[in-house]
Image (cartoon, rainbow, N blue to C red):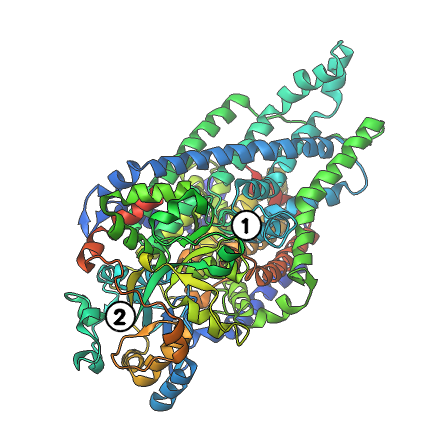
Amino acid sequence: MSSRPGRPFTRIAAGLVAATLLLTSCGDGPDQPAAREVVLVTYDSFALPEAAAAAFEEATGFRIRVVTGGDSGSVLTSALLRAGAPDGDVIFGIDGASASRVLAEDLLEPFVPAAVGSGAVPDALRLPGELADLLTPVDTGDVCVIADAEWFAARGLEAPRTLADLTDPRFRDLLVVQSPVTSSPGLAFLVGTVAAEGEGWPAYWERLRDNGVRVRPSWDDAYNTDYTVSGGDRPLVVSYASSPPAEVVFSEGTRTAPASTVLVDTCVRQVEYAGVLRGAPNPEGARQLVEFMLGPEWQAELPLTNFVLPAVTGTPLPATFEQFAARPTDPLTLPADRIGAERDDWVERWRELLE
Amino acid sequence: MSDRRPPAVRRAAVAGTLTSAAVAVLVVVPVLAVALSAFRTDETWSTAAFERVLTSDRTWRIVAVTVAQAVASTVLTLAVGLPVAWTLGRFEFPGRRLVRVVALVPFVLPSVVLATAVAALLGPAGPLDLRGTWWAVLAAHAAFNLAVVVFVVGDAFGRLGASVEDAARMLGAPARGAFTRATLPAVRPAVVSAAAVVFLFCLTSFGVLVVLGGGRVTTIEVEVYFRATRQFDLSGAAVLSIVQLLCVVVALTVVGALQRRSGAASGRVTRRAPSRAGDRWWVAATVGIVGLVAGLPMVALLDRSFRVGRAYSWSNWTNLGSVLEGTGLAVSPIGALGRSLSAATLAAVLATAVAVPAAVVAARRPGRLADRVLMLPLAVSATTLGLGVLLVAGRPPIDLRDAWWLVPLVQALVALPLVVRVVAPALRAVPTNALDSAAVLGAGPRARWWRVEVPAVRGAVAAGAGLAFVASIGEFGATVFIARVDRATVPVAIGSLASRPGAAGLGQAMALSCLLVLICGAVLLVVDRLGEVGRIGTAGAAD
């Protein structure tokens, strides 16, 4: 009660008001949408094909700004929570296994690029039903367990080959996977185990758990932090069949051969889709970008930037990719509608077992 | 009494009642939205989400572990805090005030900042990596809540003085007996109060878990967030929100019953110099504990903010202006800071403008409906509020999720009860004889309000505004739901940077945390110069 009436209070009040005015007038930088910009919402590890992006800007006048928010599962969920008032124009990286989620909130605007209608993209990559008009297939990849070959060689240990091997006590505490809740390869791997083990998949995961599997929220965390090739402590990681060429390319000459070998019997085929977000600030730019993603520049640059296979048939593949990427002939698979119907139950059960 | 009220007060009372009603709407509507969405599965009404979530073993595991960690955190906080409270309550020594302020620091810092500071010691950049274990979480909870024990129980020890113990000893009780049989029972009410507050804070703790849990240790609060924002299981998140709300209600009821039974201590605060050798040992131990628990994490935070790996570097600070790859941020940390400052300033102005008339109502009728309603935002957990606001704001036909004022509004809502708590007791404490004297000397009702009451609470209002600013700029649990990725506030940015495995984003998180420490410190210093810092301790820690 002792504070004297007088100036400090008035001064602080005046200061606060002045500060408010000042801050609200200058703190708005990122808010104002640049007039000629198209915002691509995608996952952390996505690498923008720079040359193609420059070509896109040249052709359309739209600069691409990439907004990331975790692994693709998290990105899709954030987008769903903001359906109708999205953080960007185009969403990329929705995989086949989570595709049916976009129906829940009318997340996307229907758009089918000409390249899809013309048959340049194999029909097998298109989704069934109304999803076909919402999601455009851009690339495919195989999610597989990969092994640090040098790590195993140094210990005179033979690397595992199959899903069953991963539960072998010889490989205890060696595997790191991604959570199927937040991560697209994580979900693909879970789908793979359901495809391989059938009704017995929960028991398989119990064996994995008892054998010391580590779970990370995203591919980035698992591969770049925990995998021994990146300096971590786990020589087995769920990654991609294209990780070996990626290791060669990113080594910038220090590696002439990949560090990892692919466990081809563990692979699950995955398709990545793009869509135009409903309520996009720049719907015209969004449609042009999705169209451009199937164009020759973007498609040709994908293998060595994102280490995926182009969706458009006949796109030439770089030699490094041809040489080092594993091409599993018989990947694990499940029908899209079954995944759509049961995915949430699998994830719930998985969380109960592993978390 | 009402006829004596000056028009300004009457107007304030009307405004205050309206405020209470508005607060009720702003809190109840989001909670209702959460409750309703718990009954929505696949666009139809059903109890499927309840069956699904409540029959899962995992849910009950999480509920059990949430309660268990809150109990463990409370026990740890008491174990660390009681000796400190005893020493600070009992002894007068040079630097005593400084020790109290240092103990208060973690409590007034945003939870994600404190957690980042603890991560500087017990995280991947520190000497011991305990991130992802309960140990790191418990340590942060103890650091955060130390102030509650020190302030609430310390005053009780002080009021007790040494007289009771001396009396017991004179009556023949041995030294230990005097303490356990005379002193402890007398301070038990204060200990119960402090323990209750600590328990409730830990039960609904969120920022600490996000940063230090590493995705491996989880509580109900974190699970609500995870289900809603990662799994897109809104109905499941809503069911867990309701479970959380019930836990809080049960805890509040138990606490209320305990406090009624124990009654409060009262008396004059007496302290003496630590004259005996044993006394000096206690003082040294106290300085050591406070330095270790509250001071060291801050020092480590500052130190680590200047390191990349093991080597010293400016780059965490010089990079604050840029969006770094692999950190998962869509805005630069400096951009987030500008946004945070403006949002928190707006929120503080709004909360204070609304809280003063509200406090008039609360002060005249403590414990009545209006007073209780104003405390509602404290009872609802931050994630419940955030989830609810997101659900309500996204309802067509009006989509408010992009409105720039949504974040400041929610922050003001969260800060409002704190301001009311600071201002209402000050209003209540205006001596009636001062008002009567003024009336006798010819002051009209209006003059009495402006020239006696307002000057008397001015300091409290400033303290409340400062507290509202600090609470708003640090708000994490609700903001993280509603801030767009390209409009992240500083705590959201820190949460995102510091929760990533590995040390990639940690450097920027630490530099940003240091900035927030500086800002909060500067605001509190201004408040302190007005002689009101004590109010903050009591506002946060009052029942």
Q: Is residue B252 left or right of residue A84?
A: right
Q: Position of residue A208 (x, y in %)?
A: 38, 45
In this orientation, which residue lies closer to the viewer: A192 or A215?
A: A192
Residue A41 to residue B510: above or below: below
In this orientation, which residue lies closer to the viewer: B442 or A320?
A: A320
In this orientation, which residue lies closer to the viewer: A309 or B70?
A: A309
Q: Is residue B499 left or right of residue B86?
A: left
Give the structural element (helix, strand or loop) at label 2.
loop
Determine which residue is flagged by label 2: A278
Q: Position of residue B531 (x, y in %)?
A: 69, 49
Q: Position of residue B154 (x, y in %)?
A: 67, 33
In this orientation, which residue lies closer to the viewer: B181 or B167?
A: B181
Indicate the quadrant where residue A108 lies: bottom left
Residue at the bottom extreme?
A: A58
Give the structural element (helix, strand or loop) at label 1.
helix
Q: Which residue is at a point 78% across and 36% down the rendered structure image? A: B284
Q: Is residue B286 left or right of residue B47?
A: right
Q: Which residue is at a point 63% across and 31% down the rendered structure image? A: B79
Indicate the quadrant where residue B321 lies: bottom right
> Chain for mark 2?
A
Q: Position of residue B340 (x, y in %)?
A: 52, 63
Residue at the left extreme?
A: A129
Amino acid marked by disc 1? Ser
Amino acid marked by disc 2? Arg
Residue B458 visible somewhere in the drawing: no
Q: Which residue is at a point 76% across and 9% down the rendered structure image? A: B172
Q: Which label sits on residue A63?
A: none
> Chain for mark 1?
B
Residue A119 visible somewhere in the drawing: yes
Q: Which label sits on residue B111?
A: 1
- How much space separates mark 2 and mark 1, taking CA atoms? 36 Å
Residue B175 to residue B247: above or below: above
